[in-house]
Amino acid sequence: MPHQPIFALLLACTLLAACGRQPPATTPASPSNASDPSTASNDTGAPGSFAFEEASIADLQARMAGGGLSSHALTQAYLERIAAIDDAGPMLNAVIELNPRALEEADARDAERKAGKVRGALHGIPVLLKDNIDATPMVNSAGSLALAEHRPKTDAFLVRRLREAGAVILGKTNLSEWANIRSSRSTSGWSARGGQTRNPYALDRSPCGSSAGTGTAIAANLAVVGIGTETDGSIICPSAVAALVGIKPTVGLVSRDGIIPISHSQDTAGPMARSVADAAALLAAISGRDDADAATRASAGHATVDYSPHLKADGLQGARIGVVRGLMGYQPDVDAAMARAIQAIEAAGATVVDAEIPTLGQWNDAEFEVLKYELKADLESYLRKSDAPIRTLAGLIEFNQRHAAQEMPYFGQDIFEQAQAKGPLSEPAYIAARTKARRLAGPEGIDAALAAAHLDALAAPATSPAWLIDPINGDHFTGAGYGAAATAGTPSITVPMGDSHGLPVGIVFMGPAWSEPRLVELAYSFEQATRARKPPRFLPSVTPGATVTKR
């Protein structure tokens, strides 16, 4: 497993129905709710049947500012959309729990707007969170039955930031259980608590992971934007296979306080959205220093409060982009889409050169060693701090053994067991592995490649098209381009670049630490030049031999 990104080596499982959810309590419609007949529910899941299909934050803010739409009506529309196509219809099974206070939060934002107080770009905007982020009053479970009744008493730092920015927390999304760190054979988008999330572009295809539910939900317009988390690929991969923009920030730009962890060296939360502008707005809202997360101290002077000046259609003009050919060659349609993407980048005024990460893949073994050490230490710290019902990794292993039929019907817990055998973070083996992984992926990897050719960013295909869910043979993951940035703790951003037989594929841009503003410029320019995203049609499957989209 260490020779490929840990969070993309997954096995598939059977499709399970969504866990039952109680809808938020309804509240009477205000006059502004009633004034927008376009929000009436006629959602069939078919293209064009949802009033807010592909709606952007800016579009929705303009409608709310003009008085033709309320946050209550918008939130209600997304709740009905979830009922129509997540719980019924194609049964995407992306949302694991709804916030019972969502409509109350929306009403509060409407009251503030009526009183002349608008908190910012996210005021009244419904947001979904991955189910490893503390958000009251909901459960935070990482998809495990062991934490199915774990209700943290406080919000994660990033959730507090979202609420301060005026966002409405709509609910929580399913994920690959324990963010794919329980087993080397874990299944993308499956958890014991949430079942199997499906890819909205082809229901028999993988949503990737571990932020599978957020990827599927935002692609399917179940909310305006969503939050995922990543240790290695868990934002970039599910975004790419769902034709989303996903930003994996520099480690330390976004606080990890209140997030069920794997690794303090690599963990981060980040935005998943249908456009670069929406992803950037969400990133600005959740960034900032937090005394509870020491890594955020380094973000002083780097946290951008407004990315709108970086939404430049000519952001690629004069840029130097290095294409990492060593991260290509694993899938013909992906290579063809990348060739068209390179043409688009050059047409937008950038210089494209071949680039090489000299240490490519050499950090894998050391990275995996670090993740096992830090999993035990960091997870147990979270469990104690959040007053979880189980406080140790050994206790989780024992729970899974006692509930094997529910927790381990498809794969075991070999990584949990390997992590349990590790000692403290003071051990020389851990310190050496952490130093080696960071050095090979960062200074001698991404940083060396950028410096060698004086590049603004590296570029590569994000990952392969979504593979079939296959409980017998497992995943058919063939390649990815995000591992170096994940291990180095540096930023990456994926943008749709085309498709393979209707299955989305994305490009990933990678830069040095704290280069999010420049990456947003490059990604926005590429997005505007290509406009590759297409909404999903919830097809049962793809048609083999269909013509690949030409752009």
Image (cartoon, rainbow, N blue to C red):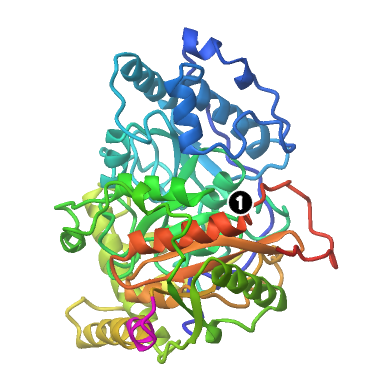
Q: In this orientation, which residue lies closer to the viewer: 151 or 514?
A: 514
Residue 176 seen: yes
Residue 59 point in image, percent of width and height: 50, 33
Residue 260 point in image, percent of width and height: 34, 55
Local secondary structure at mark 1: loop
Say whether residue 245 is left or right of residue 137: right
Q: Residue at x 84, y 66 (%)?
A: 544
> Which range of residues does the magenta coloring cover?
447-455
Q: Is residue 453 magenta?
A: yes
Q: Quadrant of the C terminus?
A: bottom right
The image shows residue 375, relative to residue 152, as above or below, that is below
Residue 57 point in image, percent of width and height: 46, 37
The image shows residue 345, relative to residue 284, as above or below, that is below
* Residue indicated by mark 1: 197
What main secondary structure does the magenta stretch of the protein show?
helix
Q: Residue at x 51, y 58 (%)?
A: 176
Q: In this orientation, which residue lies closer to the viewer: 72 or 123?
A: 123
| Count of labels in the image | 1
Q: Amino acid at mark 1?
A: Thr
